[in-house]
Every structure is written in C-alpha cells, then in structure tokens.
Image: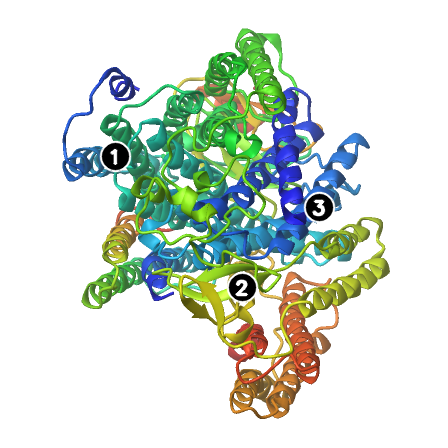
Amino acid sequence: MALLLPAFRRREPRAAPDDRRQRLWLWGLGLAFPSVVLATLTGYGLVVGERLLPHAASDLVTVTAEARQWEWRFGYADRPGQTTENVLHIPAGRPVDVQITSLDVIHSFWVPRLAGKLDAIPGHVNVLRIEATRPGTYRGLSAEFSGEGYLGHTFRVEAHDPASWGAFLRGDAP
Amino acid sequence: MRDVLRLSVPLALWLAGFSGVYALQGLTCSRHWPEDLPARPALLVGWALAVLLQAVLLWLISRDPSPSRFVQGTSLALAAVSLLAAAWTSMPVALTSTCL
Amino acid sequence: MFALGGVLAMLIRAQLASPHSAFMGPEVYNQVFTMHGTVMMFLFAIPFFEAMTVYLLPGMLGTRDMAYPRLSAYGFWCYLIGAATMVVALVLGLAPADGWFMYPPLTSTEYSPGINADVWLLAITFIEVSAIAAAVEVVVTVLRYRAAGMSLSRMPIFAWYILVVAVMILTAFPPMILGSVLLETERALDWPFFQVDKGGDALLWQHLFWLFGHPEVYIIFLPAAGMIATILPVMARTTLLGYGWVVGAAVSLAVLSFGLWVHHMFTTGIPHMGLAFFSAASTLVAVPTAVQIFAWIGTLWKGRPELHLPMLWILGFFATFVIGGLTGVMLAVVPFNWQVHDTHFVVAHLHYVLIGGYVFPMVAAVYYFLPIITGRTRFFKLGEVAFWLVVPGFHVTFLAVHLVGLLGMRRRIWTYAPEDGWAIINLVASVGGFVTAIGFALIVVDIAVNAAVASRGRRNPWGAGTLEWATAIPSPSYNVASIPEVRGRYPLHDDPEIAVRIARGEGYLSWPTRKRRETLVVGTSRAEPLQVAVLPGNDGLPFVMAVATAVVFLAPLWDAYRTAGVALLVVIALALRWAWSNGSTRDEGPLDAGRGTSLPSAWEVPDPPGWWGSLFLLLADATMFGSLLFGYAFLWTVAPAWPPASYVAPGLLDVLLALVGAAALAAGPRLAARALLASRGPWIGLLVALAGAGALTAAAASIWAARPDPTSHAYDATLWLLGGFVALHTTLAAIILAYVCFRVAAGYASSVRIGETRIAQLWCDFAGSTGLVALAAAWLPGVFA
C-alpha cells in the first residue's frame, strides 16, 4: 500500500529504462525479498514443528481417545479397563501421548491451550503430544464438522498434580 | 508445439519428482517397507535424482535453443525455477524426522 | 449467433449469482453453508470467468469465435441444467449438508442416508463436464486460433493466463471427478472405497479432493490476475512491466499449486516430513505471486495511473489480497496451522483470497469491458458508492472473523454461547457483511441502469492497445470483419488505423465468398497462417445433447439406471450426428485466404482442430487415469484393512490378449492412414484396430470374471473400476473406429482428408496404452505375492 500511493502522486513518469525497473521491482522486490523471508519462516516452522512431535520421553503417559457422534471416550494405559466419557484426566507437568481414533466419521481432537489439533480418522490411530504445565481444567473440542451434533461435541481435560493423579490411577474419586 | 513443451515439461517433471519423493516417503512409513532398510538414504537418493533430472533438463534447453528469443528466455527461467523448486521442496528429507 | 446468445445468458446468470451468495453469507446453517461454498466455487466463480473468456477471448486474439462454438453452447446448457438442479434441491431441502468438501464417511450412506449427498456428487460432476469442455476449447483457441503473426510473445497477457488456467482445469478436475465417481459408486452400489473395515480409507477422498481443491484456488485466482494484468497497464497509460516475468510467474504458480494439496490435511496425522514437503512448497508458491504483484506495482510506477472505477477496484484488490496472502503464509507454517485449522481464521483467510483476489478484479473487469458489451459509456456514478460500501464493509467483516478465529471459534458451528466472548465481534462482522451485500446489490443496479440508458460511447474509450478494442462497440458477433496481421504486443498502439483497416477487409478471410463462416488456424508458436477452419452455423443440437447428458447424470438420483442407460445411448448417437455435420465429401484444394495467400481447408490436413481438441481432452483423461492409479497405490500402501484375502493372478491367455490387443490398436489406425495417403481403402487397418479393441476388452473382462464381487473389499472394487476404465476406452475407440468406417464409406475420406483417421489413432493409442498399464497394475501384486 505504501508503495502504491506514491505512484498516483507523481505527475510525470521518470525516464528510467524498463530493464532498470525490472531489476528493482522484479529481481529485488519480486524474487529476493519474499524468498529470504519465506525461507526463514519455513525453517522456523519446521524447527518448532519438530519440537512438538511425540519423540520418545522418559516420564511419558499414554492415553487413548475414541471419538464418535457426538461423544469422546478416553482410556488410560496406566490403568487398563478404566474409561471416562467426555473428561480426560492427565498428570500436569508430564508429556502425554494421546492416541486418537474414531468409531464412525472424521472428528478432530483439539485442546486449544495444550496443543494443536489432530484428526480422529476411522481405522487410523494418530498420536498427539500434549503437556499441561499447571494443574487445572482445560476446554477441549472436536474441530471437524461431523453433522448435526457438532456444536455440542466438546470435552474437558483435568490436569492433576502428582498426588491427585496417583489417586485417580488408584480409582479414588478425582 | 515444441515451444509449448519447452515451457511446460521442466515444471511438470518437478511435480512428478515431488510426488515421487512424497510417495517414497509414504512407502518408507508403510507396512511394505522392510524393517532393516534405512529410510533416509533412500529418500536422499530420491531427492538427488529429482534435482539431477532438473539439471539435465536445464542443460538440454540451453543447448538446443528455441528460434524465439522470448520462448528461450522464459523456458530457461522456468527450468531454473524447477531446479530450485526440486532442491527446495524436497529439502525436508535431510532435516525432519521421517515417520513421526 | 446461437453461441453468442448462450454466452450472453451465461454472463447474466453469473452476475446474478454473485449478490445471491453475498446474501446467503455464513449466517444460515448446514445446508446453507454447504451450498454457500458449493455455489460460490462451482456455480459462480468458475462459470463466471469462463463466460467472460468465451465472450472476450476471440476478440483479444483477433479471431472470429472460439474453436468449437457448439461446444461452448453445450457447456453452457450443461451448466444451466446442473445449476438449476442444485438450486431446486436447495429449495426442496434436499441440498447436501456435509460441508462443501464432503468428507466421507460423513457423506457415506450410513451417515447421510438421503439423496442430498447424491445431488452434490452428480450435479457437480455434471457441471465439471461443462468446465472441461470449456477448458479444451480455450486451450485449442489460444494455441491455434489467433490473428496472423501473433506469436507466443505477442499474445495479450490475458490469453497466457487463461491458457494456463485451462490446462489446470484439464489436470485438476479429473481427480475430483474420480473422487465423486468413487463416492457415488460406494453410495449407490456399495463398493467400499472409503469404508475402513472393508479395505477402504476415508483419507483417500481428502487426497483426491484437495488434489483438485488447491489448484482450484489458483484456477479461480489466475483469470482475475489476468484481468488485472490487462487492465492495470491501460489505467496507468503504459505497458505491462516484465511481460516475460509475469508469464513465467503465472506458469510456475500454476504447476507449483499442484504440489500443495496436503496443506489442507496438516491435521490428519500425516508424518511431519510429509507435511514439511508441502509446507516448503506452500511458501515457495508465494514467490511467483510476489513477482506478479510487484510487476503490477512497478507498472503503476512506470506509468501515470488514472483513478477510473476499474482502477479503484484493483486498488481494493491490492489492499485485500496482500493481507490474504500474508495469512496464507502464516497458515503454511505447520505448527500455526495445527492451532487454527478449521477455525474462523481459515474462513477469513479464504474469503480475503477469494473475494479480494477474484471478485474485486472481476468487478473491475466487468466495468472495464462494459463498453464492449453494451456499447455505452458509464454515466451514473453508483459504482463509486458501491465500491466505498463493499471494500470497507468487507474488511470490517473479515478482520472481525480473523479475530474470532484466533479466539478459537470453530467453523461450521451454528451458534455459540454468550460466555465465549465472541458476540460483539460477530455482530460487527454481520453488520459489515450486510453493508458489503448492499454494495454488491448496488453494483448490479449500476450495471443494469448504465447498460439500459447511458449514452452511446466511442470505440476504445480507455486507449487500450489490444485487439478486442479494434471492433465497433458493442462488438458484433463475428468480432472482426477480417483477421488482422499483427506485428507487436499492442497492435492498436503500433498502428492506430488498424481498426479501420480490419473493417475495410484488409486482413485475411474478409469476404465470405464461399458462403460459410470461416476463420484462420495458425501455428502454435509463431502464428503463421496454416489452415482455413469452417465454423458451424446455428444449431439446436447442443441443447438437445445437454438435456440428454443431464438425464444420464441425474436419473441415478431416483435409481432410474435404465433411463440413464438409454439416455447415454442417445448422447452417443447425438455426438456422432454432431460430428457427422463436419467435413466434406470432395477435395477442395488450396483456398484463397486473402492477402495473396492460399491455405488448405482444415478438413484437408492431418491435424484438424478436432485432433487438437482430442489431444487435450485425452490429457484430462490421462490425469483421471493417473488419479485412479494413485488411489489404488494409496489404498495398497495406507489402508488399514489390507492386504485383501488374495490377489488376482493373470492367466497366460489374458496377458496375450492384452498385449496383442494393444498392439493391434496401435498399428491399425496407422495402417489405415497410410493406405488413405496412398489412395487405397483403409479397411484392413480399421478392422485390425477394431479386433484389437475387442481383445483388450476381453482381457479387462477377465478381471471381472476372476473377482465377481466388487462389494466385498476395496481391492475388488478398485479392480472393477480399473477393468471398467479399460473397457470404457476400448468401447469408445471401437465406436470411433466404426464411425470412421461409415465416414469412409460415405466418401468423407481421401488422400488429403485423413484427419478423422488420425483422430481415431489418438483415441486408439490412448485406449491401448492405458489399457496395458491398467492391467499391469491389476496383475502386479498378484504376480509378486
């Protein structure tokens, strides 16, 4: 915009030959400028993206998330047999891998304050790494349109401190 | 028609190479890929082939110029773009984790 | 002329579609947002620029009409019927309600039992047929139907853009058509392409859809960019800066855009390296866009811009599109995408790109070309008022939508709670939306009023340099009285008198001495005059054929497969009747083309326009075939319920049949053409090819016989489809061969009139080579297992 307006203000065209203009506008502003900016940005994105991946970790907790119209069911590797509906319990301060899948149509698992979203696709298991730094309740939603009940297809995440996480695993009321 | 091909083939083959490397990456992460075969060297070879192909095309176009100056200039530029695109877009094979 | 009437009507329809959709907005829900996206993408954006193209392109190229005027008319009627079906479905409440990109399994029978999704799949595929028809025609027109001397480097910049776009349509639509075919066969016949427990995979749809969907964005943007590159230099009273750069940028943008499809699928759990490829490609594609933008800004600096209304809209484009581009770059960054994917941020981004990058430039184009269409100078100044309503209104709306997206509002939810804190922002967005809509309505009023009552204007009111302004306004249906010889990129600047000289008949083919509509065919690269093509007269056939085609596509909605089959036979018969009306039963020899040249008739050359049309139609067909192979490979690699219980293994006889069949298909037409050249009868060659078609069909049928139940596993369904693809093309080749036999018998072939045999050769080559590849693909897993 800043470049556009002066073009209208000038009365007489400056007598520069076309090839000099090409050097400024096309080589300089058209090619070099965006290339440098974009290369930097992509590199930065890849580094950050790499850091968010579910790499191996020592104190890892694994949970499962099964979506269906319009409900979420969560399971816990540390406590086989236990499932919870529309509430996911995790320990705070530890990396958690959520294994996401779907029983019917495509849904998406999204807890905005903990991580980006990842789709739940029938037949596939996608793994999302989340980590809550502090104990508390976080809102989670399904973020892929799934028909009539889409609006209310939400859940919450309870992040526990070590003591209450232990209590949850033992089966005491959280 | 030769001029039209001169303008279009390098980029079309970039697309083929790009899709090929992506398909190879999909294959390395699938059940068909042998466990003991390391994926990254295969991907690096794929990348190198795609870049090499573009270099050859660029050389061919510069060696056999079109009678039209405009077509020759533009096709050289597009072949150069394809070469850069091949180098840039498959660059992740060297940098990121393969199947996570 | 019939075609012209059709094209005008097409313009009117498209102009009506715009405010309609602005009214719909994202306020009224599921069917409405699905239809909003569908209508805007498929029923407005694409047909609108196609209409502009069909109307303006011949003038720009200095020729009389598009290469296949009857095909224009056919495409138009297909579009009209398909669009009407969608609208009726919406009124009846039968419109699809699963989002405009129709992800299965939500769209599979189990979760969408009504015919709503079928309406989408069938009607959209039907409309895409018309888009492909138009694209074939545009490619052939730009490559072969230009003014003499208009070499590639002298083409108007819009011709370059639209050539690129047409090739993109030919290569991007087929994956989508294939996807629709797969989903429709799953819904109608229970072939489980997307059912995971039977070896299908829901992700296959997303790949096929976005393989189309991303290029689609550029298919929409590039014609608008072509309009900007045409209008902006005229408004700045100069010439385009860096013509070659802009051409190169448009071509690279087009091809690069095919390497972006996965960036719509960043959240589907594809490995990070896969995402990284597409992230890199997505940022790369911004570079040619930047080259174009800066070429345009540089052009403004070079000239002395004047602020006419079209220029105003182009400024609106700059202000909006640059923001859309920046948010696009943000979205290309994977981690950011994971966070805002499927929120209103994405919605705002795509509206900035599509409205800023397409609608604003097209409004500029409508105002710019209005004198050609109506012959009048704009008098009432409503257009300026409309501009000041639309652009600020639009920005208020979608800046707010960006914000609410960043605050976490998902797309496609039909309401939200007050405690979400989105209420005021959404209210602001809605008010802005209504202001925008009022502005759009004003544009329509403005155009209608000015078209009806403004004063007659003079020729070439803007002082442009390209040939569409060399005609009287409003432009006559034959465009040019004679076809000019051009020596530069801006013929009207090179020779201010060219309009008069065209009208005086100093160009090629000035007097209709042979009492038929003729135009010039030139060489693709240097545009030297080569042939004299005869354009058809007014004809009702395209309409009848469009109606029959509509029955083929729409009868399955009511499970009326027999009706559809009968209609298909009718379509074939009509197509043959159509083709029959071309050609001549005697050799005319070289014809006087004016300016002292004599050229052969297009009926007496080895590469008639029909050959070029077939070539590019087969390009689309080849892409379709490639997509089918991709789908097969994808399921084999990724689908969870693979491998199937067993693979099909070929018998020796089947392999032999396939090889011999393909060889005969390749050899037959060549033999026939050689015999014709030597003035002998082509019968042996034609019969050899027919036998080859039969053998290859038998080989394909052996696959069906080996796997009788396509509903049991996605592998079987895929085999059926591969076999079907082969059989379809061998049948087509056989029909064409039989047709050529009848033509030869009726005297339509001679040692110079071999064009039709050569067209048959193209189709036979295609059927033979794809047949071999398809059968090899079907048999290979079984051979290795």
- Secondary element type, mark 1: helix
For residue C614, above or below residue C655:
above
Q: Nearer the viewer, residue B8 or C451?
A: C451
Residue C104 in the figure: left or right of residue B58: right
Q: Estimate the x, y position of residue A146 in percent, counting from the top left.
A: 65, 34
Labels 2 & 1 near each other (Cβ < 8 A): no
Quarter of image, res C262: top left
Q: Cα distance, mark 2 to mark 3?
A: 34 Å
Find numbered disc 2 in the image and state the secondary structure of the residue it sits on.
strand
Residue marked by disc 2: C533
Answer with mark 2 or mark 3, whichever residue precedes in sequence: 3
Query: What residue is drawn where x is 81% and y is 58%?
Result: C564
Q: Quadrant of residue C785?
A: bottom right
Q: How many marks?
A: 3
Q: Which mark is residue A59?
A: none
Tag 1 and tag 3 share a subunit: no
Quarter of the figure that contains the C terminus of chain A: top right
Q: CA distance from mark 2 to mark 1?
A: 47 Å
Q: Viewer-proximal residue, C284 or C140?
A: C140
Q: Amino acid at mark 3?
A: Ala
Q: Amino acid at mark 1?
A: Pro
Q: Which residue is mark 1?
A: A34
Q: In the rendered image, is residue C30 in sight?
A: no
Q: Is residue A27 left or right of residue A55?
A: left
Rendered location of residue C203, percent (x, y): 56, 48
Q: Amino acid at mark 2?
A: Ala
Q: Residues within 10 Å of mark 2 (few under 14, many from 20)?
A: some
Instruction: Work out how far the residue at label 1 is from the one at label 3, CA to CA, in angstroms.
Output: 41 Å
- Same chain under badges 2 and 3? The reply is yes
Q: Is residue B21 visible?
A: yes
